[in-house]
Image (cartoon, grey):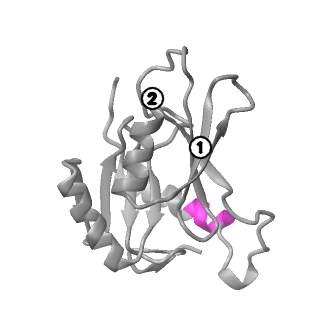
Amino acid sequence: MTTTTPDPAALEAERARIRSAHLKPAGERPSSTARGLHHTALISSDVETTVRFYQDVLGFPLTELIENRDYPGSSHFFFDIGNGNLVAFFDFPGLDVGAYAEVLGGLHHMAISVDPEHWRELVQRLTDAGVEHAVHSGVSVYFRDPDGARIELIADPLGEMYGHHVL
């Protein structure tokens, strides 16, 4: 992989151009055509390991475990992450889907908002479970799930990020 050092001023100029062309003030934005994120689906190498991590370590209750309609024998299971939102998983027994990889168009990380009191408790749970993690800005903790997906728990409210309204 070849890397180059981009010009920070040129990158900021491009962000400014895109903001100017596409970002409307809050009062001028149309309503979204979406109702919300129904679920994000990730791939699990082992259903029970995933359930133990997301439910027992992170405190996200398992809400359903059914057969995946698209691949006989595969499981499709869901965890409640609050506000009617779910994180879901598939397993694909018999398929070699390979290890987690960040690719263009793929998942970089999934950020889940938790209240500050729970955030501190969850950081401790990660520590107690021996999960390697990194805290940033005093409100974000990053770690990888058992299959390598990068997860962020953020103590900022929904629609805010580091003191900025993003919604």
Q: Position of residue 164 (x, y in %)?
A: 45, 78
Q: Which residues are magenta?
A: 17-22
Dot 2 and dot 1 residues touching (CB under 8 Å) = no
Residue 10 seen by the camera? no
Q: How many marks?
A: 2
Which residue is label 1 attached to? 77
Residue 114 seen by the camera? yes
Q: Main secondary structure of the magenta part?
A: helix
Residue at horizontal 31%, vertical 54%? 142
Residue at horizontal 77%, vertical 63%? 34
72 or 27: nearer the viewer: 72
Which residue is label 2 attached to? 45
Residue at horizontal 74%, vertical 32%? 69
Q: Is residue 123 above or below residue 109?
A: below
Magenta stretch contains residue 20: yes
Q: Position of residue 163 (x, y in %)?
A: 40, 80
Residue at horizontal 41%, vertical 25%? 99
